Image (cartoon, rainbow, N blue to C red):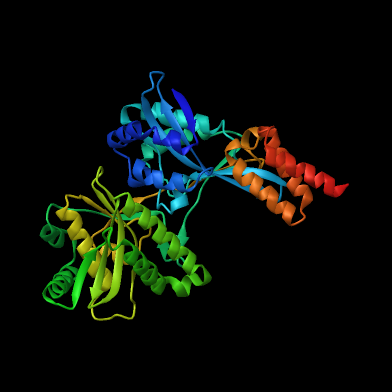
Amino acid sequence: MLIERVDSFTDFQNLKTAWEDVYQRDPEAQFFLSWKWLAGVLENHPGEWIVLAARRADETYLGFLPLRLKTVWSNSQQQLRNEIQFVGRLFWADYGGILCVPESEFEVLSAFASHVKQLNWSHMSLKGFRISERRFGMFIAPLVDERLIIESESSIINDGETDNLVCPYIDLPETFEAYLAEKLSSNTRQKIRRFLRRLESSTEYQVTTTSPETQARDGRILELLWSKVWSEQKGSDTERLATTYRMIVERGLDDEIVHQSILWHNDSPIGILASFVDWQKSRLLFFVGGRDEDFRDLPVGLVLHACNIRWAIENGIRTYDLLRGNEPYKYSLGAADVRLRYPVIRTQSGVNLNGRFDPGGLREAIRLADKFAERNHTQSAVTACQQILAVSPGHEAARCLVETLAGARS
């Protein structure tokens, strides 16, 4: 089994055919490992990721592991180090994982784990690892090493009310009427029927779907309504977070992997839902929404989710994925749970495994060195440059910065 390291977007693009073949064959494949979604992530974050590709000598690809490579400064060690995460966290993916063809899963997962131990990192934080118990055991076993500490973390948010390692989902029947009858309590079923009848018989309400012609307008609506819900909790970060959500959704709309619907009362938008569509695996994944919380005439969130589920069923989709968080409203819609993992693996020493800085982090490393120099943290800047030059002796920016700092000292 050969493991290739891919770190340029062009090389990633060349993997498209093989990637989509493995994705289709892998029963554990999930949307945040799909080629089209990952293309948006990787293209927007050059120099922050690597992809490990497992193949045979005959060029047949059997698996892929996309990873985020972070460069950080260790205050305790006074040097640069690297951290590994799932690459999807750059685009706020709710979970991550590994692609592999089922007939070669042991071979692929063991090879990935063994190769990861040859990389240079001090911490590997795999938050939201969506993987079967069988495959997880295959992957984690080769990582047992006296140099490493393996721990399992939790992810509890909202003052202890929400477990963010739980992903509720709904298996959808073939008709919306069957969904109402089989998945819901009688009270919720009656409410949905009543409000949908009201929606469909009234001239005051309508639901629209985002199109290329309305995309810019609907992006502004998403920012506005999301901010209405979260501004008090998010404070000064509200605008930045809302803008990021809009950017991710607009990229998905451009790539035709997002379904976005808006509920209107007359000419005013009162609610919005944006969901990822995975046609290959027949899943609709609710990603982000917002609503006018001052509007009380009908339950905006319930109505939009009901419309989303109906749209999914009518389009042959068989799973409605509500993503992370065990909020009670998800279970009122008929959801069951999938449990995610959160393994954290770190070196005993606190410095990079194998004693070197990873060359994939050079872009961020020189940025940190420049920042140290600007703040007159000369020794830190020199140390960072020395680590850069140790793995890339011809790195012009690092060499020039060292010379400049030496001149300033003399």
Q: Residue 398 lies in what quarter of the image?
A: top right
Instruction: Compare residues 17 and 179 and report the one nearer the observer.
Output: 17
- Quadrant in which the N terminus is drawn: top left
Q: Is residue 144 left or right of residue 375?
A: left
Residue 380 in the image: above or below residue 57: below
Residue drawn at 31 percent across, 27 percent down: 103
Percent coordinates x, y for residue 372 in the rendering: 72, 52
What is the residue that sits farthest to the right in this orientation?
410
Residue drawn at 46 percent across, 56 percent down: 155
Instruction: Compare residues 185 and 5 and report the one nearer the observer.
Output: 5
Percent coordinates x, y for residue 108 in the rendering: 41, 29
Instruction: Compare residues 167 and 409 and report the one nearer the observer.
Output: 409
Residue 246 in the image: above or below residue 265: above
Residue 374 in the image: above or below residue 306: above
Residue drawn at 30 percent across, 32 percent down: 21
Q: Residue 345 lies in what quarter of the image?
A: top right
Q: Is residue 331 left or right of residue 354?
A: left
Residue 52 appears in view: yes
Percent coordinates x, y for residue 149 in the rendering: 58, 41
What is the residue that sits farthest to the top in this orientation?
58
Residue 215 in the image: above or below residue 133: below
Number of numbered tags placed on the structure image: 0
Q: Is residue 353 left or right of residue 274?
A: right
Residue 74 appears in view: no
Q: Residue 228 lies in what quarter of the image?
A: bottom left
Percent coordinates x, y for residue 13 in the rendering: 40, 36
Residue drawn at 33 percent across, 52 percent down: 254
